[in-house]
Image (cartoon, rainbow, N blue to C red):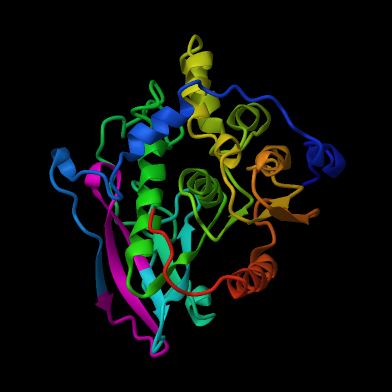
Amino acid sequence: MPSADLTLAECRAYRPELPLPGDFDAFWDRTLGAGPHGSGPGGGEPEKPRFEEVDAGLSQVRVHDVSIPGYDGRPVRGWLRMPAGATGPLGCVVEFLGYGRGRGLPHEQLTWACAGYAHLVMDTRGQGWSSAGGVTADTDPGASGTVPGFLTRGVESPGTHYYRRVFTDAVRSVEAMREHPGVDPGRIVVTGVSQGGGIALAVAGLVPGLAGVMPDVPFLCNIPRGARITGLPPYTEIAAYLRLYRDRTDSVFRTLSYFDAAHHATRATAPALFSIAMMDEICPPSTCFTAYNRYAGPKDVRVYEFNGHEGGTQHHQAEQLAWVRSLFAGLSAGPAART
């Protein structure tokens, strides 16, 4: 359908003022803690990431079943795929998934490994009811919600909100790959489509020293606008909640501001390749451009004028493959700071 959002020229110039909580940085410093993996469940010693190789029936790709201590040390699962027979530390792509998707099956998503990179796909806690199943539960306080979905889970406070746990899982996943002996810690790129794109932007703002970030039609950008102009899920979860709790509008949007990828984008410095679709009715282009226009590092964008939320699909993946190859070619493989 034709877009009812801003024109491309208007989107490129769109720089709305978004209220930033005064303790935004302090909140995330407290959340992520001092250590690379935080504490274990109940405050005990942190666990270590586990990588167990599985037989996926593939001769050219090795697959590992991954368990990483995420938020509060609780495990988040994933798949790590690496080209068979690879020698030396590899560049790595860490991927976060779209809304409702889980890590799927071990033989899926082989493009990055076939291109010669390590590829970690992080499961999204509590999700995976779509065609790609997930195995990571979300049992923390605030895990249940008044309305279906995840945007309003624990929305009463940033401390209990669902995406506090997910963003922490994502940061821990990047840290785990930096410590993996088969990965060059200086050549790690984060990426994702929709929800995954928003998570990738958040990680780019929270983790220094990334090689790059590729947000693809990103969700969670300028959340107040998305909730007000979009008639499709997931943003409609916010409207459904506020129809029940008419007096909570200000507090809800304040909580969500801690998880708005447009704020995290202002703290990101890694090179970025965005994709934005101008007929996207799920993540309206003006919301995506809010994050792009505020992004603090070097950036480029591919605009798909006549596409909806599917964006550029495989056409855009070809752009990403070329971009990552060029990006990594300019970086020397070898030791880098493990932060």
Residue 282 lies in quadrant: top right
Queried whether the magenta region covers residue 246, the answer comes back as no
**Location of residue 320 in the rendering, given as x and y in whole percent from the top left corner:** 64, 67
Is residue 59 located in the magenta-colored stretch of the structure?
yes
**Picture coordinates of residue 311 (x, y %)?**
68, 57
| 279 displayed left or right of 159 | right
Q: Is residue 152 visible?
A: no
- The residue drawn where x is 41% and y is 25% is 155
Q: Residue visible at 56% across and 32% down?
A: 236
In percent of width and height, residue 20 lies at 56, 24
Q: Residue at x 53, y 38 (%)?
A: 234
Seen at 28% across and 82% down, the residue is 55
In the image, residue 73 sits, relative to residue 248, either above or below, namely below
Residue 165 image offset from top left, x and y in percent: 35, 40
Q: Identify the magenta region.
A: 53-79
Total label count? 0
- Front residue of this view, candidates 308 and 316: 316
